Each structure stands twice: as C-alpha cells, then as structure tokens.
Amino acid sequence: MVFSSHLFLFYFLPLSLGLYYLMPMRGRNTLLTLLSYLFYSWSNPLFTLLMFFSTLVDYVCGRIIGTSSPARNQRKRKIALLISIATNLGLLGIFKYSHFALENYNILLAAAGVDGLGIETGFRFILPLGISFYTFQSMSYSIDVYRGEAGYKRNFIDFACYVSMFPQLVAGPIIRFQEVANQLETRSHTMAKFSRGVTFFSLGMAKKVLLANGCGKIADICFSTGTLHWLDAWYGAIAYSFQIYFDFSGYSDMAIGLGLMFGFVFPKNFSSPYKSASITEFWRRWHISLSTWLREYLYIPLGGNRKGRSRTAINLIIVMFLGGLWHGASWNFIIWGLLHGAFLGFERSRERRSVYFKLRRPIRVGMTFYWLLLPGFSSEQRLCRELWSIFLQCLLRQQ
C-alpha cells in the first residue's frame, strides 16, 4: 500500500484518522500500532513477524540496559547492546545482502578457477519493505539508552508504536528514538498542526505524482533508446536525478504531514539539495535523517575529525561506503558511496586551500550538480557510460 494509492487515500487514511480521534488519549498509541501493523502486512503478512521480532529484541535489550547500573553492570549493558546491534544488522544482512554476497562469492571462485566450493541455490529471500528503516530506528533506541541520551521504555506498546509507525515506516525519514521519546507519552493535537499536516501531505503527493512521475517518463524514454545523442544523455540524466529527488522528498513530505495529523513532529529530511555548492553541503541537505544517523552512530564513534586529516578522510570513505551499501545491495551503490566518500574527504582536506571554494557560489552549485550526475547518481549503467564518454571526449578536445 503506497500513500498515493486510491486504497490509502480514500479508505485507509480516513478510517485511521476517524478511529484515532474517536479513541481516548490513552489508547491512541495502541490503535496506531495496530493500524501500522495492518498497513505493513498489506503486501505480505509474514513481514510483520520479522518487525515484531526486531521490536521485541530491542525492547528487552533496552530494558536491560536502562535498568542496569553503569557502574556495577557495565558488562551486562554492553552484552545487551551488542545483542541489539547484532540482531538488527543480522536481519538486514540476511534479507538484503545474502544473495549479493553469495553471488559475488561464486563469481570470485569462478574467476580464481576453483571448482567445487561454490554455493548454488535457487532460494532467494524476499526483501521486506522498510527493513532498512525500521532496523536503524530500532537500533538507535538501544544506543540512545546505552549512552544515557534517552530513557528506556517501560510500555512495550509505546515502543512498538515508535518502530512500526506507518507514516515513516516504508520510506523514512529515519526517526531516532530521542526525537520522539517525549511525543510518545504526550503530544498536542491542534487544528493548526493538523492543517500543516494536510498541506505537507498534499505538497508531497504533488511532488510524487505530478513531478516525479513526469520526470520518470522522460528518463524512461531516454533509457530505452538504442543510441543516445549527447544531448539526450544529459536530458535523461537530469530528468532521472529530479525523479529521484521529487519521489524521495515527496514521500518524506507525505510522511511528515501524516505525522502532524497524528500529533507527531518529524524532522525535515530534504532541504533543496541540488542548491548545494559542495558535496559536503549536499549531504547536509539530502536525506538528512540518514546523514544524521550515520554521523551520530558511525562517523563520530570512528573518531570523526578528531584524529587528523588522513584519518578523517578514511572515516568519511568508510561511512559513505556503508551508506552506499545501505541504499542497495549492488556494486553500483558501493562505488557510488566510495566516490562520495572520496569527494567528502578531498573537500575536507582542501577546504581552506582549494581554488574551487573561492569561486562564486552559482558556479560551485553548477559544478556540484555536474559531479553529482557523473559518479552514478543514476543506476542506469549505459547512461553513466555515455556521460563519462562525453566527459572524456571534452577533456581530449581541450588538450
């Protein structure tokens, strides 16, 4: 079930809002949890068992961490935290990356000429919807409680509501527990907030239906042609880039709007990313909730920028490699992440000395958008090859 579908707009959403506001305040989290599980089970009811398992493990681990003394039971707290992280990453690894890993393992053995050690299987896990989002959210709860940045939840329903909340379950934004911990207990429901929610939802759906789908049709036409003229290649690449942006940001706006309708305030997830004047600025504007999650739970624990320029660059490459892998189990996303990590590391080390940062902002915005297209912002390999070919030809002509 998607937000722009007839079923969601004219049946599920009105019924959910009606039941929610008829329900007494104490029962609203319970109702929202049940509605979220119904929403999630629409594609495959078995997926709910996986989400419930992840929720239960993190709830128990969070309770152990929260009730144990840091001075006397630190080992117990660390074990609970490791179980939470291992469970979530294990689920993500099995369902999202197992087939990719086996496929590359077999390719590596074949390239090395080794016979008899390959793993051949026709079985393939179905990727559960939203697993990349709710595992990260659920994991952030255990980490926040361990760090003392949030208290543990005694009420299992409240925690289950946080993990399963349907507005942001499938396409984000990734909500960290500390951002909504207080809202799960008390939140306001006003006409002004509800009206803002309707506005956000409407604008987000307009982005998705009117802009993203339109750009997608242009990109599909360019991708389906046998031979691309250089102008068509750029036309298709730009259309595809805006399709990704309008689609993703549209869903995020709809999620924020739905959250406001139910009394929740979710953080902003996009801030005009194609206006960025550097790759560093781009990642402050694009998928902000993911960038924040990676910074708080990966980049800073790795040492951040506290251990010199070389270590900072390595940390950025590691983080963006994992960020690329999070987006999808394919070498396209891995290479895309590594290139962005290299760009970020280069900018960080050259920020004060580079001539680039002395250029006027409009020029830097254009150059940044150009570089965003080239590393494979599109997953269409043929189009990327065309763009790189054009780029190299231009360089040769200048020489």
Image: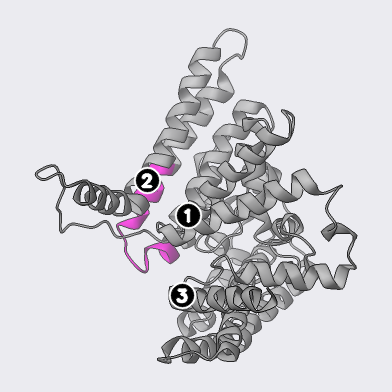
Quadrant for the N terminus, please: bottom left
Q: Are marks 2 and 3 in contact (CB under 8 Å)?
A: no
Q: Are marks 3 and 1 in contact (CB under 8 Å)?
A: no
Q: Nearer the viewer, mark 2 or mark 3?
A: 3
Amino acid type of the residue tagged 3 in the rendering: Glu
According to the image, label 3 marks what residue?
Answer: 380
Crowding at mark 1 (Cα within 10 Å: few <14, some 14-19, many 20+): many
Q: How is the image coloured?
A: one colour
Give x and y (percent) for residue 398: 69, 76
According to the image, label 1 marks what residue?
Answer: 334
Residue 151 visible, this angle = no
Residue 43 located left or right of residue 315: left
Crowding at mark 3 (Cα within 10 Å: few <14, some 14-19, many 20+): some
Going from the N terminus, do you reach mark 3 or mark 1 first? Answer: 1
According to the image, label 2 marks what residue?
Answer: 93
Residue 268 visible, this angle = yes
Residue 370 falls within the magenta-colored stretch: no
Q: Secondary structure at mark 1?
A: helix
Residue 361 located left or right of residue 178: right
Front in this rendered view, residue 210 or 369: 369
Going from the N terminus, do you reach mark 2 or mark 1 first? Answer: 2
Report the magenta stretch's main SS.
helix
Quadrant for the C terminus, please: bottom right
Rounded to the nearest angstrom, the CA distance separating label 2 from label 3 is: 25 Å
Residue 331 located left or right of residue 375: left
Q: Which residues are magenta?
A: 38-54
Rounded to the nearest angstrom, the CA distance separating label 3 from label 1 is: 14 Å
Front in this rendered view, residue 110 or 256: 110
